[in-house]
Amino acid sequence: MSDELPRAHGAPVLTARFRASPEDFRVDEIDAFEATGSGEHLLLTLEKRAMNTAFAAKRIAQWAGVPELAIGYAGLKDRHAVTRQRFSVHLPKRVAPDLAALQSEDLHVLESQWHAKKLPRGALAGNRFVLVLRDVQGQRDAIERRVQEIAARGVPNYFGEQRFGRGGDNVANALAMFAGRRMRREQRTMLLSAARSELFNRVLGVRVAADNWDRGLEGEVWMLDGSRSVFGPEPWSDALAARLAAFDIHPSGPLWGAGELRTASTARHVEESALIDDPAPALRAGLEATGLKQERRALRLKPQQLQHRWLQDEVLELQFALPAGAYATVVLRELGDIGNASAAQLPASAGERGEAASD
């Protein structure tokens, strides 16, 4: 995510650092369903420290003596954190290995249940975060006002920096792929997502700069809160105004693909104008050529149950929940300039790469 993207709430009110240790970034998946209690898939709830999802899945496969394809998980979690998430293990004979053999200092089994299906990607309601900011500099009154403003108005629903890879090179690699460079399947999926995210962030950045990211334009396409369902355009009305104010609906932006933009009038002009400058045309053409279809994403994100407390004079703890696909880092960005202290902190044994996916 480019540092040049505008902030919605004004100039930074603090500087700080986070992820000084994995315990400073805690993430718990919010389950979207309950286990069936029967079936051939063992559903495990694990807590892991300084370990990304792919590395954990590999360890589970080794423990169970099954291929990695037999392991399912709903979302990717960064290794620079303490995280709780579900995994499923396909065990056709319904014989579970000794759970104690999977336990270690950095991986704990919290719960195990049988389930009817493999856990698919995206099968979570969201994530709950507990974040600790250290070396906080700024006026406490201004910081607390900003937290209240974020709780009341929400933040722009940018794609976070994780989507763009280390050094932000995923977009450049996507352009190379569209120009003919061969990529592995998993790389291809990641780069297509980065290309879409870049275009979405450009549109959202234009609307943040114009201060209309959380209100409707003429020709707006609306997204229902908590779903991917969209409707519109339709004439502005008191009913739409009430639903917008209640966070029942949100303005939306394009996830680029083949087909016509659904927006009309002013909203469509804004989207098209935001995607004229390089490398947007090449990204648009490349995405259209893959057969991906036009989709939408909400422009506005409201953290749920946002709370804060001062652990020490320069140590601030934040707690909130976000829907699946949203990024905790975009919430932090609206507070100020917060440096990531994790890079030099974690051992390579936890996995060679961090996740290039959402928080």
Image (cartoon, grey):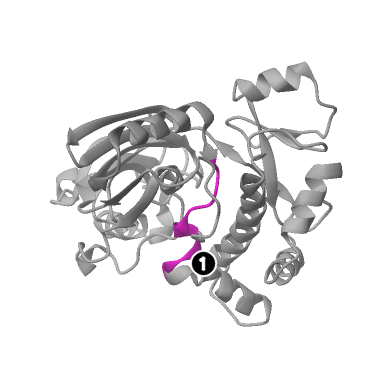
The quarter holding residue 94 reads: top left
Residue depicted at x 14% and y 51%: 104
Query: Is residue 164 visible in the rendered structure shown here?
Result: yes
Q: Amino acid at mark 1?
A: Glu
Q: Which residue is mark 1?
A: 186
**Vertical order, 341 against 99 (above or below):** below
The quarter holding residue 225 reads: top right
**Vertical order, 114 against 4 (above or below):** above
**Would residue 40 be found to the left or right of residue 44 on screen?**
right
- Residue 117: x and y, percent? 47, 40
What is the secondary structure assignment of the residue under circle 1?
Answer: helix
- Residue 245: x and y, percent? 62, 22
Query: Is residue 38 visible in the rendered structure shown here?
Result: no
**Would residue 208 be found to the left or right of residue 141 on screen?**
right
Magenta residues (range): 156-166
Residue depicted at x 26% and y 46%: 137
- Residue 316: x and y, percent? 25, 38
- Residue 293: x and y, percent? 74, 54
Residue depicted at x 60% and y 72%: 174
The quarter holding residue 281 reads: bottom right
From the viewer's side, name the closer residue of 100 and 340: 340
Whether 83 is among the magenta residues is no
**Would residue 214 be found to the left or right of residue 350 on screen?**
right
Residue depicted at x 71% and y 56%: 256
From the viewer's side, name the closer residue of 305 and 337: 337
**Vertical order, 257 against 267 (above or below):** below
